[in-house]
Image: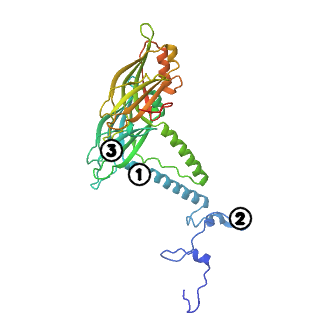
């Protein structure tokens, strides 16, 4: 096409926008309406005259015999591509992990045996990784319930064969909690890098039966993004409310208590046995605590019910095995509340509160059940694990 000097080529803006800029002849971009039959009379007439509807679909697959079959073939091809793209997600590229779970009801312990991993994602410059496995219990994930395996150097197929044990896991915990298993790459000079994770609902594990898992590592679940301001405001309010609830019920470890009510034959009263703690929160800079336990029987008008164990240095799993006795009648005990608190001893400054638990007729869950079992089974020792929280109802938490 030649254009004389001084004359401009009259091209409408619609035609200009419809030019497909690509190598070869200039051709207009097909419109979406060209792929579907028109509903007006002209289109219908064309269809009667000799397959006008198929001609309308001809831009999709030139030379196709029928428009409907061409459209269905293309749509099926697109669907298969989307499915393949989902199947080819890089979840499998993160690697696989094998481990066993065993819940022992008699000891209230959950054992996770981390076996091995295969085909982990390379994280270092040498094309390898230094992997290790971390365990968290959800909800309430914190340093208090984190367990960690050893690190295997320079490999994408590590073998651990290491057993990590959670103590003080009740049947209620097995029903409502989830175990998060994470694989990370250790870096000495920089921060450790996350490789992948998997989450297992503990209710899938039957008591006293080992369950084997061979799972593909996944990315952590994405945070939901609100699509509107009203949704965002509702989400923020829900988040603040949930955060407040989680803050008031933050788990700080486990405490094994033994309660026994002695009938008033010679000397009646309540015997409180402080056995041990497990997975306490670290309160010192060295990653440990110096824990000890205090007990109160409230209301305590005369302030004579305080008992205190010895301090165990540098540990998050102390064993105390100490007993305290409260001389009290059975009728008076029904109106009392036993408060047990765990503290971290600090020399030269105030001690840090780790967690506590309250047992009485106004308690809930395992605490109430433990108290009722103690009152029903007079003369028998009743042991139970309790979850320590960062707040204790009705207590000022004063040292």
Asked which secondary structure carries label 2, the reply is: helix
Label 3 – label 2 distance at C-alpha: 61 Å
Q: Residue at x 61, y 58 (%)?
A: 68
Q: Which mark is residue 44?
A: 2
Q: Residue at x 39, y 46 (%)?
A: 196
Q: Earlier in the sequence, mark 3 or mark 2?
A: 2
Q: Is residue 56 above or below residue 354?
A: below
Circle 3 residue? 118
- Point out residue 17 in the picture as x, y percentages from the top left corner: 58, 74
Circle 1 residue? 90
Q: Nearer the viewer, mark 3 or mark 2?
A: 3
Q: In this view of the protein, which residue sits in the foreground, 339 or 75?
A: 339
Q: Earlier in the sequence, mark 3 or mark 1?
A: 1
Considering every residue shown, the one lying at the far top of the view is 265
The quadrant in which residue 14 appears is bottom right
Q: Quadrant of the N terminus?
A: bottom right
- Point out residue 26 in the picture as x, y percentages from the top left corner: 53, 77
């Amino acid at each position: 096409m030649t254009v004389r000097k001084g004359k401009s080529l009259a091209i409408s803006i619609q035609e200009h926008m419809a030019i497909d800029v690509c190598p070869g002849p200039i051709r207009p971009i097909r419109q979406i309406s060209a792929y579907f039959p028109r509903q007006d009379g002209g289109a219908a007439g064309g269809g009667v005259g000799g397959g006008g509807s198929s001609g309308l679909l001809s831009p999709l697959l030139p030379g196709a015999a029928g428009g409907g079959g061409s459209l269905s073939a293309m749509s099926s091809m697109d669907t298969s591509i989307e499915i393949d793209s989902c199947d080819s997600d890089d979840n499998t590229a993160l690697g696989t992990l094998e481990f066993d779970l065993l819940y022992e009801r008699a000891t209230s312990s959950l054992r996770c045996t981390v076996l091995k991993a295969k085909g982990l994602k390379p994280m270092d410059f040498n094309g390898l990784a230094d992997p290790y496995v971390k365990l968290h219990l959800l909800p309430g994930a914190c340093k208090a319930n984190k367990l960690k395996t050893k690190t295997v150097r320079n490999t994408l197929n590590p073998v651990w064969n290491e057993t990590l044990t959670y103590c003080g896991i009740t049947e209620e915990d097995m029903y409502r909690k989830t175990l998060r298993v994470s694989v990370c790459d250790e870096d000495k000079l920089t921060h450790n890098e996350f490789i992948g994770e998997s989450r297992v609902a503990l209710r899938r594990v039957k008591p006293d039966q080992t369950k084997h898992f061979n799972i593909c590592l996944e990315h952590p679940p994405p945070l939901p993004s609100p699509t509107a301001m009203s949704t965002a405001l509702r989400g923020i309010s829900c988040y603040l409310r949930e955060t407040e609830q989680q803050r008031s019920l933050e788990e700080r470890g486990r405490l094994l208590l033994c309660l026994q009510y002695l009938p008033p034959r010679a000397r009646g009263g309540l015997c409180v046995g402080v056995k041990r703690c497990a997975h306490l929160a670290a309160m010192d800079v060295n990653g440990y605590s110096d824990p000890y336990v205090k007990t109160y029987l409230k209301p305590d008008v005369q302030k004579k019910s305080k008992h205190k164990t010895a301090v165990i240095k540098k540990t998050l799993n102390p064993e105390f095995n100490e007993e305290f006795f409260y001389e009290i009648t059975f009728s008076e005990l029904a109106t009392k509340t036993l408060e047990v608190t765990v503290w971290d001893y600090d020399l030269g400054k105030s001690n840090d509160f780790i967690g506590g638990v309250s047992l009485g007729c106004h308690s809930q869950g395992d605490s109430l059940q433990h108290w009722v079992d103690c009152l029903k089974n007079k003369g028998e020792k009743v042991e139970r694990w309790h979850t320590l929280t960062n707040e204790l109802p009705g207590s000022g938490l004063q040292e």
